[in-house]
Image (spheres, helix red, strand yellow):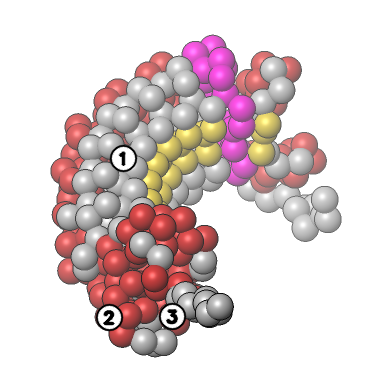
Amino acid sequence: MMSVTPTRGSLLDLPWEDILVPHILCHLPLQQLLSLQRVSKSFQSLIQLYLANMRCFDSSQIGPAIPRAAFVNLLKDNEVLQQLALQNCSEWLTDRELLPVIGQNHHLHQIQLKGCTQLSRHALVAISLSCPQLRQLSLAHCEWVDSLSLRSLADHCKALEAVDLTACRQLKDEAICYLVQKCGRLKSLSLAVNANVGDVAVEETAKCCPELEHLDLTGCLRVKNDSIRVLAEYCPKLRSLKVKHCHNVAESSLSILRSRGVELDVEPPLQRALVLLQDVVGFAPFINLQI
């Protein structure tokens, strides 16, 4: 009687597109997958197939910084991205590298560009024209964002639910009003660290975005009590409000929100009193008091 010796299979024998890419490789860290390319030409081909079918790309998975050439090579064949996070590319990312990726990925619904200061307004216009399904966008500390590019975003991406405009200092009330008028589904909005944003923008946001849950007004020095009261009236789903360093917002205007259980980020009462004293008399003798 002949004995049958079982053949030893290989990982690469499994169907690549049906099994390996969607069910196995997707559970491995991207950095490990890139290392696999050095094993053999077959593995290199497999990883290239995976990269072309990748739905989510987060540059932080590769390390503290990703080289420009590596970024371009990784995404050159991908046309199915849904999530794109590029904060770890902020030191070198320009329109030249970003626009081709945006132009060939029309299904993006989440983009993270925090701190990408070398881009231009053309990047935001390209996003607005190529990504009609966009729902989440972070442009924090991107001072190149201006009113015209934000208008383009508002005109073409009406499904937006979360927008981070922290420290986008070119933007004024008028630009914010246009955005919220066009994007009434917003649930999360950050206008923090922008001295140009005031009551007009906050009141329009409250009236146009009834689904609003999170609003960050940290450091918006022109925001006052009246707009906070409007916010309390028109946004019943509000869960968190940040008004730290908004020295013109008093506790009286926050009381309704506080009674509803809204999470409030404000200075401690004593610190707020000291700041107000400084505004009134020009100095605060105990401003260095530990609180």
Which of pointers 3 and 2 lies earlier in the amino acid sequence? Answer: 3
Residues shaded magenta: 227-249
Q: Is residue 172 above or below residue 83?
A: above
Q: Residue furthest right?
A: 290
Q: Is residue 289 visible?
A: yes
What type is the residue that disc 1 sits on? Leu
Q: Residue at x 76, y 41 (%)?
A: 268
Q: Residue at x 29, y 76 (%)?
A: 45
- The residue where tag 1 is placed is 134
- Mark in the foreground, 3 or 2: 3
Residue 69: assigned label: 2
> What distance separates the C-alpha of mark 2 from that of mark 1?
27 Å
- The quarter of the displayed image where residue 113 is located: bottom left
Please check the rendered image and state whether residue 147 is part of the magenta-colored stretch, yes or no: no
Q: Residue 137 appears at what percent x and percent y?
A: 37, 45
> What distance separates the C-alpha of mark 3 from that of mark 1?
32 Å
- The residue where tag 3 is placed is 36
Q: Residue at x 31, y 53 (%)?
A: 81
Q: Are marks 3 and 2 in contact (CB under 8 Å)?
A: no
What type is the residue that disc 3 sits on? Leu
Q: Secondary structure at mark 2?
A: helix
Q: Is residue 140 left or right of residue 52?
A: right
Q: Residue 60 appears at what percent x and percent y?
A: 48, 67
Quadrant of the frame with the N terminus: bottom right
Which of pointers 3 and 1 lies earlier in the amino acid sequence? Answer: 3
Please check the rendered image and state whether residue 239 is part of the magenta-colored stretch, yes or no: yes
Q: Nearer the viewer, residue 225 or 244?
A: 244
Q: Secondary structure at mark 1?
A: loop
Q: Nearer the viewer, residue 8 or 224?
A: 8
